[in-house]
């Protein structure tokens, strides 16, 4: 009997090791590739296909597949918590109880329906060659010295930018977004495009993701990260396993891998704050950050923002 059980366990392990997964994500592709390769080294024979785009396009693709009755991803990972809540409300997410030792349970949303695996903040990024005195508060961006120097990503494409619009509109009022428009703020499609232009000096300031700025700094760009004293925007970017997953056990293995010491080290090396308390912090980052949890812009707020900035009319 023991030999039979051992053989059964071996077959089960081989089945998992030779499985395949499909991930839909808005994460930066080079960061995803680093994680996927590390996971595959631990799980030889696993195939992991990735569809990557901005959050808006990922959500649109998944909505179309759901309407057609043929959703494809085994895992979903992007910056739109409202959509995760929508899926959870329809009973379309698998509940995975937290089992990783030391995991902060407040990041297992809905009791394990979707997980935070690292922390992402929207901050003020500064090109130090164009701006000598950096702002310290969100309201500072509307001041005269910064006129014509500011940009942010398109909230229709970027989930992090959608969080920026919703959070700043809620905390400072929509008039603040109008004041940014009057100060000459421009819109770029995505955070990576914006960060590259900021690094080249096309802008002096950007409302953007902290990890991406650190990646540009590591390449030698003259940039600095400012965590506003009134709160950097903590953007939920969770991972979930949908109920339609064709390989849920392997998907759960990948989720647990993202919380492992190796994956948390990769996050830190690529500029993210790890979610695990004992993981190393990214190089050059403050030990503690004053954060405010993001609120994603609703349809009405996004429509007003689009009209204000001439987007998607």
Image (spheres, grey):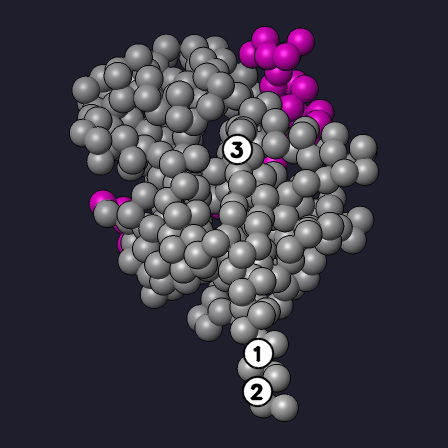
Precedes in sequence: disc 2 or disc 3: 2
Task: Describe the element under mark 2 as helix, strand or loop.
Answer: helix
Q: Indicate the position of residue 229 as horizontal and vertical percent values.
A: 37, 41
Q: Indicate the position of residue 54 as horizontal and vertical percent values.
A: 54, 29
Residue at 35 percent of width and 39 percent of height: 211
How far is mark 2 from mark 3, CA to CA? Answer: 44 Å
Q: Indicate the position of residue 136 as horizontal and vertical percent values.
A: 33, 34
Residue at 65 percent of width and 18 percent of height: 304
In this image, 136 relative to 6: left or right?
left
> Which residue position holds label 3?
52
Q: Is residue 297 magenta?
A: yes
Res 201 seen here: yes
> Which residue position holds label 1?
7
- Nearer-the-camera pick, 276 or 143: 276
> Which residue position holds label 2?
3
Residue at 32 percent of width and 33 percent of height: 213
Dots 1 and 2: beta carbons under 8 Å? Answer: yes
Q: In this rendering, is residue 291 above or below 184? A: below
| Label 2 CA crowd tier, 10 Å (few <14, some 14–19, many 20+) | few
How far is mark 1 from mark 3, CA to CA? Answer: 38 Å
Task: Describe the element under mark 1 as helix, strand or loop.
Answer: helix
In this image, 51 relative to 244: left or right?
left
- Nearer-the-camera pick, 126 or 51: 51
How far is mark 1 from mark 2, CA to CA? Answer: 6 Å
Residue at 35 percent of width and 24 percent of height: 195
- Boundaries of the magenta span: 284-313
């Amino acid at each position: 009997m023991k030999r039979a059980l051992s053989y059964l366990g071996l077959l089960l392990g081989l089945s998992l090791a030779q499985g395949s997964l499909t991930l839909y994500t808005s994460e930066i592709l080079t960061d995803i590739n680093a994680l996927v390769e590390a996971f595959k080294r631990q799980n030889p024979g696993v195939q992991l296909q990735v569809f990557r785009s901005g959050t808006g396009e990922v959500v649109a693709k998944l909505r179309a597949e759901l309407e057609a009755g043929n959703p494809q991803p085994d895992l979903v990972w992007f910056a739109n918590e409202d959509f995760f809540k929508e899926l959870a409300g329809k009973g379309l997410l698998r509940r995975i109880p937290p089992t990783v030792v030391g995991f902060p349970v407040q990041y297992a949303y809905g009791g394990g329906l979707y997980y935070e695996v690292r922390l992402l903040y929207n901050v003020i990024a500064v090109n130090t060659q164009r701006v000598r005195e950096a702002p310290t508060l969100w309201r500072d961006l509307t001041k005269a010295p910064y006129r014509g120097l500011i940009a942010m990503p398109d909230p229709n494409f970027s989930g992090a930018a959608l969080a920026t619009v919703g959070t700043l509109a809620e905390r400072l009022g929509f008039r603040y977004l109008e004041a940014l428009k009057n100060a000459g703020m421009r819109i770029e499609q995505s955070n990576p495009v914006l960060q590259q232009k900021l690094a080249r000096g096309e802008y002096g300031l950007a409302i953007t993701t902290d990890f991406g700025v650190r990646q540009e700094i590591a390449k030698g760009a003259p940039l600095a990260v400012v965590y506003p004293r009134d709160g950097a925007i903590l953007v939920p970017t969770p991972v979930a396993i949908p109920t339609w997953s064709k390989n849920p056990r392997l998907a759960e293995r990948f989720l647990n891998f993202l919380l492992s010491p190796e994956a948390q080290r990769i996050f830190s090396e690529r500029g993210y704050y790890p979610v695990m308390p004992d993981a190393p912090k990214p190089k050059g980052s403050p030990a503690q950050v004053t954060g405010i949890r993001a609120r994603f812009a609703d349809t009405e707020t996004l429509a007003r923002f689009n009209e204000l900035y001439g987007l998607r009319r």
